[in-house]
Amino acid sequence: MKRKIGMYTVDGRTIEYSVTGEGDIPILVLHGGHSNCYEEFGYRPLITGGFKIITPSRAGYGRTSKAIGESLSKACEYYVKLLDYLEIGKVHLLAVSAGGPSGLYFASHYPERVKTLTLQSAVTNEWHTPKDNLYKIAQVVFRPFMEKITWKLVSNISNGFPKFMFKQMAPSFSNLSYEEIKSKMSDNDMDEIRRMNNRQRSGHGFLIDLSQTKDITAKHLQVISCPTLIMHSKNDSAVPLQHACYADQQISDSQLCLLDSWGHLIWLGHDSNHVHEKLVKFLVRYVDR
């Protein structure tokens, strides 16, 4: 997959970004947690469909300055500056997992820049509060001085023992039993997860994400006017299904696509072709919007 990596600096703050694909139809991807501009889940069908994918490493991820993540408002302001720099007007906006709040804020405050919004396995309201054990654990293992060690350990085990590593991680992705998950997996899923574990890093970004999910309110969703596709697995344990249902209730022009995929990573498994086809069909419908 050909990918151009760029660095854009403005006001002393830097955004790392990638441009993937040769198409004329731009998609702005706001990636999920522990990711960056090297994300690749779901990209190939979009590239084949004639789209060009712009992926900034979100605030605190990759080589993007953590300073732009002082608020969702500030971060989205800089994503707009990046589009201006790239001379891109309106985009199809795709927000994934922990990138959901950024996508919702962007769509609600910059409607003139957004053709459509797609939410994939997305966080749409408060998620992992300080009272939750997962929040407390994240404050330790994903702190900037620890996250490199955490992901090095995960990638080493995943490379040497991919089945073992996936079995340990499976409950964080899916509500299904391990046997049920295996029945829904494609042959290459295990290797895709191994590759994911090798590119994952948290930087300052994941803790920024956790601190900002409370900043998205119903009012932000209610003013979103663009056509919105909400794609979510019924078996997702990382971001509960209620996030998708909540977004569908609040956004006026939305359609909810419930998936029977094995979990949070909806780009994998037997159902993945349906996910790709549904998304491309939705985007093509609004190309000239």
Image (cartoon, rainbow, N blue to C red):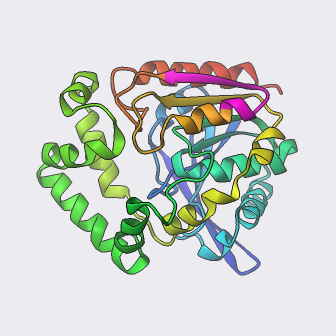
Please say whether residue 257 is one of the residues in the magenta stretch.
yes
Percent coordinates x, y for residue 24 in the rendering: 70, 35
Please say whether residue 95 is one of the residues in the magenta stretch.
no
Residue at 18% x, 50% y: name it. Answer: 165
Residue 175: tell me if it is visible: yes
Q: Is residue 174 left or right of residue 70?
A: left
Residue at 73% x, 59% y: name it. Answer: 76
Placement of 74 over or under 255, stated as above or below: below
Percent coordinates x, y for residue 281 in the rendering: 62, 18
Residue at 42% x, 72% y: name it. Answer: 139
Q: Is residue 90 left or right of residue 257?
A: right
Relative depth, front residue between 14 and 268:
268
Percent coordinates x, y for residue 125 in the rendering: 62, 48
The residue range painted magenta reads 248-258
Question: Which quadrant of the figure has residue 79?
Answer: bottom right
Residue 23: tell me if it is visible: no
Q: In this view, does 133 lie to the left or right of 157?
A: right
Question: Which quadrant of the figure has residue 166?
Answer: top left
Relative depth, front residue between 51 and 35:
35
Residue at 52% x, 46% y: name it. Answer: 97
Placement of 87 over or under 150, stated as above or below: above
Relative depth, front residue between 27 and 182:
182
Quarter containing the N terminus: top left
Quarter containing the C terminus: top right
Q: How many labels does the image show?
A: 0
Relative depth, front residue between 188 and 221:
221
Percent coordinates x, y for residue 267 in the rendering: 42, 32
The extreme right residue here reads: 112
